[in-house]
Every structure is written in structure tokens, then in C-alpha cells.
Image (tube, helix red, strand yellow):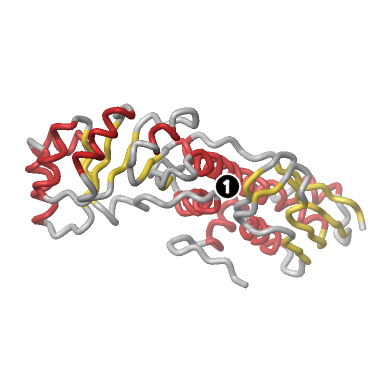
Amino acid sequence: MTFLLPGFDIDSFVRATLAEDLGDRGDITAAAVIPADARFDGVMDSRDPITVAGLPLAEAFFRALDPQVEIERLVEDGAQVAAGTALLRLRGAARALLTAERSALNTVQHLSGIATLARTYVDAVAGTGATLLDTRKTLPGLRVLEKYATRMGGATNHRMGLWDAAMIKDNHVAVAGSVEAAVARAVAAGIERIIVEVDRIDQIEPALGAGATHLLLDNMPPPVLREAVALVAGRVPTEASGGVRLDTIRAIAETGVTYVSVGRLTQSAPAADIGLDFASV
């Protein structure tokens, strides 16, 4: 089955990544050390408990250099696995597999790291009714992949970009003159989703009165969040944001907010410890 991510050209990503690694001389180590007809078996496995993401991309790297490679996917993206779990088994041309190894591993390690962190945060708010959101704090060019990884960890995607919802923040308000003026202009422009950042209780009614469809409650402590949620009274979704950590997210989620957004899911996730061990056939 072909793996597709809307808005992301996987083939171009694979080609560009391999080109970066190969330069204009190719893999000089594999060419010098590995016989051209050598065959290898390999197993990709996790050295830590992780939530898996990116295996179809790893396969794409191996297939790009060895179209005849035999790959057995042993788990699916989104699976939570124990340390020592085998993820992929592959057999093919040794030079090709060794050349693709680092690009494949880098991708799976990065995306699984994001998915694993997202799952930790999702588990922390379980039962509160709040939904975990990611943010636009992603590496340039990798947003679609990183947001895919947060979904594999159980999170929900926030805006994909600047195009799919208006988000009026403090700098927009400062230039527009007021919350009401900024929201009114977004409404006049025909924008359906209008997210408004508020950091004070007294900004809520003006934002709602002007036509906000979603309130981002910025850097409010739990007691203030409860007051804000009570004041909004379900008229629009509410989102707690700003400085959310694993040790604080449950108290934040228990205030009754609809969403909690966490930038560190994509901004600060450590790479998962995943390896690829080969054995000569």
C-alpha cells in the first residue's frame, strides 16, 4: 500500500535527503569496502520503549536505492512498543541498504521521538476531557511529517499553517489598535475560523462580541483558567497555551478547557533510540 501524506511530496523528500548525504561522490565507504554483489539481512529495532512513527518513510529510503529490497514491517506507526522490539526486517543489496541506513534512521528516530513525547502528554490528560494540540513550532520543511508524528502519538493537529485559520495574537492587536478592531477586520475578510489570544479575563467578552470563534487563553494559571472557562460558558472552544509542561498539564486540563496546546511536542522532543543491525546473508 502506498503511503501518502497530503501536502507532502515523499519522493522529493527522499531524493533530497539522499542527495544531501551522497554529495557528488556517493557513498565512498560502501563502494570501497562492500562487494558489489554482497547481500545483507537487517533488523531495525527500538532500544527504548517508544511510540513508533515514520516506518513507511524508512522503507521509502531503502526502496529508493534498492527497488528489489524485501521489507517486512513488524509493527505499524502509532504502536507503543517495549525496548528491544523489532520494527522492520529487510533483505537486499548491502551497499544500498548501508547507504540508506542513516537517512532512514534519522527520520524514524526524529518522528518516533515526537510521537513518544506526544503520547506521554496525551496519557497525562487522560480522563480530563481536554484534547492535546500541537503547534506551528516545527522545523522548516518538516511540518507535515512532524504533525503526522504528533497524530501517531495521539495528539490532534492545530493549524497546519497561516492559511487555515486566523490567529490574532498580541502583536496583531497592538497594530490593529484593539482586540475588537482586529477581530472585526477578520470577520469582514470572511474568515470562518478566528482564534483570538487573550491573556486577561477582561479581553474575553470584547473578543467574543466581535466574533471570535475560539479563544486561546495564554499563560493563565489554573485558577484564572477556571474563571475564564466559566465566563465563556461553552460559547466557543477554549485553549490553554503557554509554558505547558508535563508536570503541569493535568492541572491545566482539569480546569475544563477544550484544548491544551504544547509547542514542545515538535520543538523539543528528543530523538528515539532506534538502531539497525545487519548480518551477512
* x 14%, y 37%: residue: 173
> Considering the numbered disc 1 on the image, is that residue within a helix, a strand or a loop?
helix
Rendering coords of residue 186 (x, y %): 14, 51
Which residue is at the front of the view, 64 or 135?
135
Position of residue 34 relative to residue 174, above or below, is below
Position of residue 6 relative to residue 195, above or below, is below
Which residue is at the front of the view, 167 or 127?
127
State the image quarter where residue 16 is shown: bottom right
Rendering coords of residue 196 (x, y %): 21, 43
Residue marked by disc 1: 111
Residue at the extreme right of the image, as rendered: 281
Question: In the picture provided, is 8 more to the left or to the right than 41?
Answer: left
Residue 23 appears anywhere in the view: no
For the N terminus, the quadrant is bottom right
Which residue is at the front of the view, 40 or 26?
40
Position of residue 14 relative to residue 113, above or below, is below
Mark 1 neighbour class, 10 Å CA radius: few under 14, some 14 to 19, many 20 or more: many
Q: At label 1, which amino acid type do we have?
A: Leu
Question: In the picture provided, is 149 more to the left or to the right than 69?
Answer: left
For the C terminus, the quadrant is bottom right
* x 34%, y 51%: residue: 159
Rendering coords of residue 267 (x, y %): 47, 37
Position of residue 224 relative to residue 72, above or below, is above
